[in-house]
Amino acid sequence: MTFTHLQSIAENYNISNSIDSRFQVLSRQFERISRELRAFKETTEHSLNSLKSWTRSLQKKTKRLDSSLANMTRALRENNHLNLRQIQKQRTVLSDLSHKIQKQQSHIGSLEPLRNQVQQGMRDLQTSLKRHQAQIMKLESQIQGLFKVISSSKKEGLDLNSIRRHQGVVLRHVQPKPKSEENRMRGRLLSGPTEQPRLWQSTMQPTVQTEEELFQLPLRHKIPHIHTPNKEARICNVGSMLFFPTTSTENYVTFQSSFQTGIHELSICTWLKVDGKYLGTILSYATENNDNMLVLYGRSSGILGIMDFVIGDPAYRELSLQNILDGHWHHLCIIWSSIEGRFWYYLDGHLVSTGSKFQKGYEIPPGGFMVLGQEQDSIGGDFDEAEAFVGRLAGFALWTRSLSSGEVSGLASGKGVPRGAVLSLDDVDQMFGSVQHVTCECLEHCM
């Protein structure tokens, strides 16, 4: 019994030892699991933070895309209305033109007999001119004969009156005047053939004649050459032009000074002729806080028919270029006012689009850096070749007020330049690369 009891005690002792070892194993497993849980928690928290930042960025991009989509929808709606109005106008013009063509055709049919008469008159005039030339040549030969008689009379000491009496006829010379003769010829050209002029007359009455009159030769009839002048220039309010020949980050222009005070209204107008397949950057105004404070540009990587009008990035509006990229001169005016955030976009003197709530109450700060032809990613630098402007800018000007529609129309038609421009091509400080500054008062001379 004692041995059995001792065996049972021994067995119970072994069980406690196994329980301790088991407990130690479980403790180590618990510590390992705790470490894994802490690592998993840290990883999860890091992933959640990344997801939150990505979500915020996605929300911003979504808002920007929503704004772009709304702007595109509004622009498409406005363009559709404009296209409908233009189609109606074109239909009206076509109908009027067809009526005019029919009237012209009937008028041309009525003018056909008159054309035949004019052709017959021209033939008669040519025949008359040939007769005049033959008679003039005959008169010249007679005068030369008189010269010979007069010269021989001088040598022989004969009197002129005796020569006249010997001939039995006195020749009286009527000297034509160049100006009146030219007028008579113009009259003949307009009215047709007339009676042949009598340059010489014969009479039996004695006439006092001087040797100087006898020596004057009659003028030969000539059809005056009418010089057709070149087409007169119509747009003569330009002043000068900037030529950006190639796509390069080295071709740009800077100004002597920038804005001295904050801007709440502005108007940007210029003539432009784009030589590239995309618009590029017309204007870029950068400050220390924002390198896209004021930008007008169209990228080669974006939509080719769209120009971005940026005020205080990321706020911008997309404007339709329409036919600007056709290689011809076009007049562009963009106007913005912080009051209600209104903006107006004029192309060739016509209002293309308008809108509101664009940077309402915003102020463009002074002291920035203005560049033409390149888009700044930092003040005065970090240019991108894909954003360069290639072409010509003429008559560029910027006002710190809103121009009226009449002033914009006057600019586009060459009637004058509104007063108060704070920036123009006269304020250009430096030109870099291959940019050329050409003086041309009229747009037609800015080649």
Image: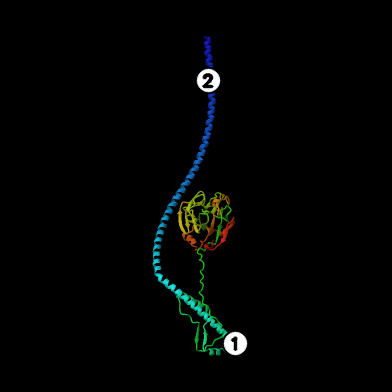
Q: In the depicted view, which residue is nearer to us: 201 or 174?
A: 201
Instruction: Name the amino acid, label 1.
Output: Lys
Point 50% across, 86% down: residue: 202
Label 1 belongs to which residue? Answer: 154
Question: Residue 142, percent across and down?
Answer: 53, 83
Question: Residue 253, percent across and down?
Answer: 57, 55
Nearer the observer, disc 2 or disc 1? 1
Compared to residue 175, the image places residue 251 above or below, namely: above
- In the rendering, which numbered label is found on residue 420? none
Q: Is residue 126 visible?
A: yes
Characterize the local packing of mark 1: few (<14), some (14-19) or many (20 or more) Cα atoms within 10 angstroms: few
Is 85 displayed left or right of 263 in the figure? left
- Which image quarter holds the C terminus? bottom right
Point 50% across, 41% down: residue: 54
Question: Residue 205, percent across and down?
Answer: 50, 89
Q: In the depicted view, which residue is nearer to us: 38 or 305?
A: 305
